[in-house]
Image (spheres, rainbow, N blue to C red):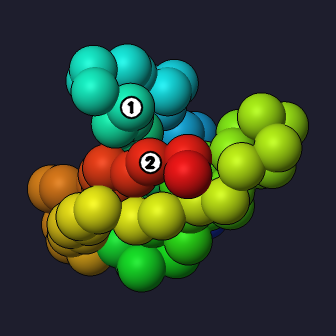
Amino acid sequence: MRKLIAAAGVAALLAGCTTTTGVVDLGDGAYMLGTHGGVGWSGSSVKADLIKEAQDRCAKEGKKFRLLSDQSVDASMSVYASAEIKFRCD
């Protein structure tokens, strides 16, 4: 029982961990933003967070967000949920 409780605690801690690339300038007005989240997160949820961050960036520039491409991967036993988007601020 203690092992189960410890495993649940570790999973809960990992669920809060994310690493993001920050906004990367790809040139020609295009940007990329990527991240991976904790265990148990869906790739769609991670991607939605990236889109919100990109929208905020464009809004600060007084421009509108335009998604160019996206990809996401759901978490599994050995893989964190992850996502990447490419976008422009028009």
Q: Is residue 62 left or right of residue 36?
A: right
Q: Position of residue 15 (x, y in %)?
A: 57, 56
Tag 1 or tag 2, which sits nearer the N-term? 1
Q: Position of residue 4 (x, y in %)?
A: 49, 68
Q: Residue at x 39, y 22 (%)?
A: 24
SS for dot 2: strand
Q: Badge 2 local density, few (<14 within 10 Å), some, or many (20+)?
A: many
Q: Nearer the viewer, residue 12 or 2?
A: 12
Q: Residue at x 67, y 59 (%)?
A: 64
Q: Residue at x 59, y 60 (%)?
A: 65
Badge 2 amino acid:
Arg
Q: Are marks 2 and 1 in contact (CB under 8 Å)?
A: yes
Residue bearing the label numbered 1: 29
Residue bearing the label numbered 2: 88
Q: Position of residue 79 (x, y in %)?
A: 18, 56
Judge whether residue 8 can be spotted in this image: no
Q: Is residue 62 left or right of residue 29?
A: right
| 32 shown above or below 70 | above
Judge whether residue 32 can be spotted in this image: yes
